[in-house]
Image (cartoon, rainbow, N blue to C red):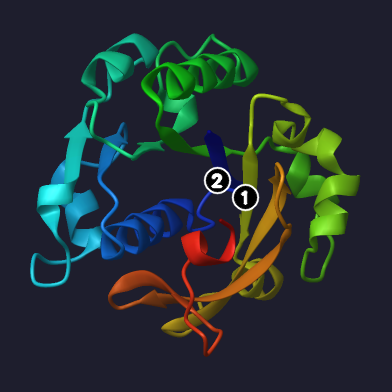
Amino acid sequence: ELIVVCGRPASGKTVFLTTMIRDANSIGIKSQVFSLELLSQHIKERIGNEKDIDYSKIEIFDDYKCDNQILERKIRENVDIVFIDYLQLLGDDIINKEKKLLELKDIAQRKNVTIIVIGQVSRKMESILPKERLSVSWLKKHSNAWEYYLFDSIDRLIYVDRYEKRLNNKKLDDLEKVDVHVVKNKGTVLGTIEYVFKKKPLKFELVSESKKGFYERFN
């Protein structure tokens, strides 16, 4: 399947991605990470140290020239999930998002893997965002402003909103609340997960006492 994690610039998308990598690793899932922006060492620092993470189950590539053809060649047969950071840097920038996503969906099906890719939302979102926390229903209602909801190739669509930062428009303390909205989820539930965005170290932590990760809640 194809999962897209999107949001405004500096909304914590990469941090959420590394949170998902840790979640997957904790339950034995094998993954590959393709970073088109950060060096592999920086991605590794965000995922965590070797005492807490089984790096035999994670392979990290940092290749700013990566495109869908290179990506498909590098995906291993025994991998469960492929993480990509991020869509707009994948291949030629004149290729539109919808075409790139269709190609990624085809790769996911041919390789029998889940692909999770980060995507930036368009500038149109800035002008319509309300001065309050977002909801799944609001995001669906205003889907024309951020495009991804309209793409049939996407199986699950996630919107990350650092609402405390967005509404306060100032530097916050170490702990900052973030909403992760599951706006499209073919065949299963929609909903919102509350996280705390910690700066030291840089990571998302669940607010809920149950501490269930993304995979446990939405699979």
Query: Quadrant location of the C terminus?
Result: bottom right
Q: Do the residues bearing badges 1 and 2 touch, measured as CB atoms within 8 Å?
A: yes
The correct choice, above or below, for 146 with respect to 12 in the image is above
- The local secondary structure at tag 2 comes to strand
Query: Neighbour class for label 1 at 10 Å: few (<14), some, many (≥20)?
Result: many
x and y percent of residue 177 in the render?
A: 57, 78
x and y percent of residue 9 in the render?
A: 54, 48
Depth order, front residue of 188/134? 188
x and y percent of residue 211 in the render?
A: 47, 81
**How far apart in space, not on screen, are marks 1 and 2 (Cα)?**
5 Å
The residue positioned 81% from the left and 47% from the top of the image is 127
Q: Quadrant of residue 33?
A: top left
Q: Quadrant of residue 147?
A: top right
| Three-letter code, disc 1 | Ile
Q: Earlier in the sequence, mark 1 or mark 2?
A: 2
Q: Which residue is mark 2?
A: 5
| Residue that protrudes farthest toward the bottom in the picture | 209
Q: Is residue 153 visible?
A: yes
The residue positioned 78% from the left and 64% from the top of the image is 134
Relative side of 193 to 46, left or right: right
Q: Which residue is mark 1?
A: 158
Relative side of 72 to 160, left or right: left
The residue positioned 82% from the left and 68% from the top of the image is 131
The correct choice, above or below, for 172 with respect to 49 in the image is below
Q: Is residue 66 visible?
A: no
- The local secondary structure at tag 1 comes to strand
x and y percent of residue 100 in the render?
A: 53, 17
The residue positioned 60% from the left and 66% from the top of the image is 162
Relative side of 17 to 131, left or right: left
Depth order, front residue of 29/69? 29
Query: Neighbour class for label 2 at 10 Å: few (<14), some, many (≥20)?
Result: many
